Amino acid sequence: MANTAAARAREQKVETRERLIRTICLRVQPLDQESFAPYGEIIGERGEIPVDLDGGALTVIAQTVEPRPLSFDFLGRHQRTEQVFVPLGGATSILAVAAPSAADSALPEIDRMAAFLLDGKQAVKLYRGTWHASAFPLGEQATFIVLDRQGTLEEDYDLRDLKTSLGIVVEIQP
């Protein structure tokens, strides 16, 4: 009988923990300058957009992302540099972001998250501190050229587990 009561108590703890995780749904929106403004800038066919690298050297990295479920529970940011993502090959993808939070804030603000449809023809620049997940390709894969400051991933990558820190999982609805 004691074992049964202990088992029920363990089950209740598990159920309680599971109830604490909420699902936040983001609807994908078209990429336009006005709606993307809190997170960065769209780079069109012509024009120049300066990129703040915090005085560091520029690196150019090729990043290929594979298809995966349209959900995430981790977001990362870079506080010392902006980043530019240039799509190659015209692959359509979704980019999930959260607006930069105060430098002393260790967590993204969930009410300032958004998901954007990238048509594979426009590059985007993310401001310093913009929280983001890797792009979600809608086809077989998507490849980007990423421009940022040398050493960014080693010395300026702030990654947060949304499940443990905020009790949420984010789902994207295309």
Image (cartoon, rainbow, N blue to C red):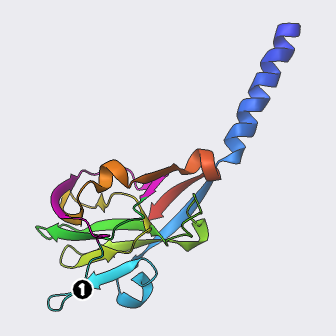
Q: At 20% from the left edge and 73% from the top edge, which residue is drawn?
A: 120
Front residue of 148/137: it is 148
Residue 45 vs 12, above or below: the answer is below
Where is residue 122 drawn, in percent x and y? 21, 79
Q: Which residues are magenta?
A: 53-76
Q: Is residue 40 left or right of residue 159?
A: left
Q: Quadrant of the N terminus?
A: top right
Q: Residue furthest right?
A: 1
Which residue is labeled 1 in the image? 49
Task: Identify the image quadrant of residue 2.
Answer: top right
Please tell me whether residue 129 is drawn above or below residue 23 in the rendered image: below
Label 1 residue SS: loop
Residue found at the far front of this picture: 55
Q: Nearer the viewer, residue 98 or 91?
A: 98
* Residue 93 as seen in the image, left or right of residue 116: left
**Figure quadrant of the C terminus:** bottom left
Residue 66 part of the magenta segment? yes
* Residue in the image at 41% along x and 65% along y: 96
Q: Is residue 79 magenta?
A: no
Residue 31 drawn at (x, y percent): 34, 81
Viewer can see residue 102? yes
Place of residue 11 in the rendered image (x, y in percent of width and height, measured from the top left): 75, 26
* Pointer 1 local density, CA inside 10 Å: few below 14, some 14–19, many at least 20: few
The answer to which image quadrant residue 6 occupies is top right
Q: How many marks?
A: 1
**Which residue corresponds to the image point at 59% horizontal and 55% vertical from the top-left?**
23
Question: Can residue 68 be seen?
Answer: no
**Label 1 sits on what residue type?**
Ile
Residue 106 percent coordinates (x, y): 57, 57
Classify residue 124 by image quadrant.
bottom left
